[in-house]
Amino acid sequence: MTPELQARIVADSRDRVAWVRARSRGITATDVATLTSERAIARAADAKLMGSGFSGNAYTNHGRLREPEIARWVAATHGIQPSSALFHAEVEKRHLATPDGVVVDAQGRIILAEIKTTNKEWRSIPRSYLRQVWWQQHVLGAERTLVAWEQHDGFVPVGDEPRCAWVDRDETEIARLVSLATALIDELYVRTQRTRTLTAAPVTTREPYRALALSD
């Protein structure tokens, strides 16, 4: 990893408290996965400010267990090293992403990996995951992402090894996501300013897991 990329690391998911706190202060790939259009901004703002209430289930637990194994396969077959770092974008530091793998190739290009588990047979990569991939490419300045996924049946992996496909950088899709993310930041700013105005006593502390820090 280059010194420039190292300098843009905000937190590490191995320190979950610090990682969650840092993510709450920006727009992540998880946030933009839901941004299908401008109509989705209000719902995304609700989730950012109040939380989704989702803390995981058997499927997410399975994914967390399998991800290190799949990451080792990605490293062995494609040379993309596992990563748990949360990065901010070069210009807009509120744009954040935690790719599952990062490598800088011999030509100096940043290549990413994204790992998924699923109980369904994919004909193509789901659109919500593509939005996550494009956002990660935007944040890190990456050219390509290897999406690796492992299908399971009753939490038993199907097949001898994961499947994978390359997703190239798409400037049109990235520009669209950046525009929607900007609108989401604006919506969060308006809501938090309104909350401050309605509060009789001055706010002396901030709740670290809320998105108040998105305000300029």
Image (spheres, rainbow, N blue to C red):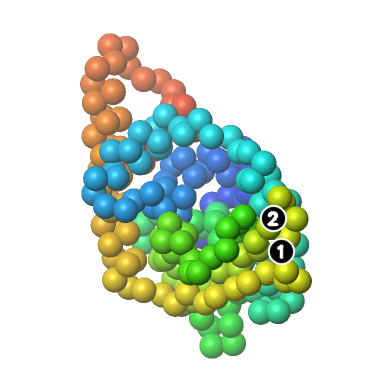
Query: What is the three-letter code of the residue carrying label 2?
Result: Asp
Nearest the viewer among 48 and 12 is 48
Q: Residue at x 72, y 51 (%)?
A: 155
Foreground pick, 38 / 162: 162
Does residue 126 sit above or below 202 in this rendering? below
**Left or right side of 134 for 159:** right
The quadrant the C terminus occupies is top left
The kind of residue on which mark 1 rests is Val
Quadrant in which the N terminus appears: bottom right
| Residue labelled with disc 1 | 158
Ranked by sequence position, the earlier of labels 2 and 1 is 2
Which residue in the structure is indicated by mark 2?
153
Secondary structure under tag 1 reads: loop
Left or right of residue 59: residue 205: left
Place residue 168 in its image quadrant: bottom left
Residue at x-position 42% and y-position 29%: 50
Residue found at x 41% / y 53%: 33
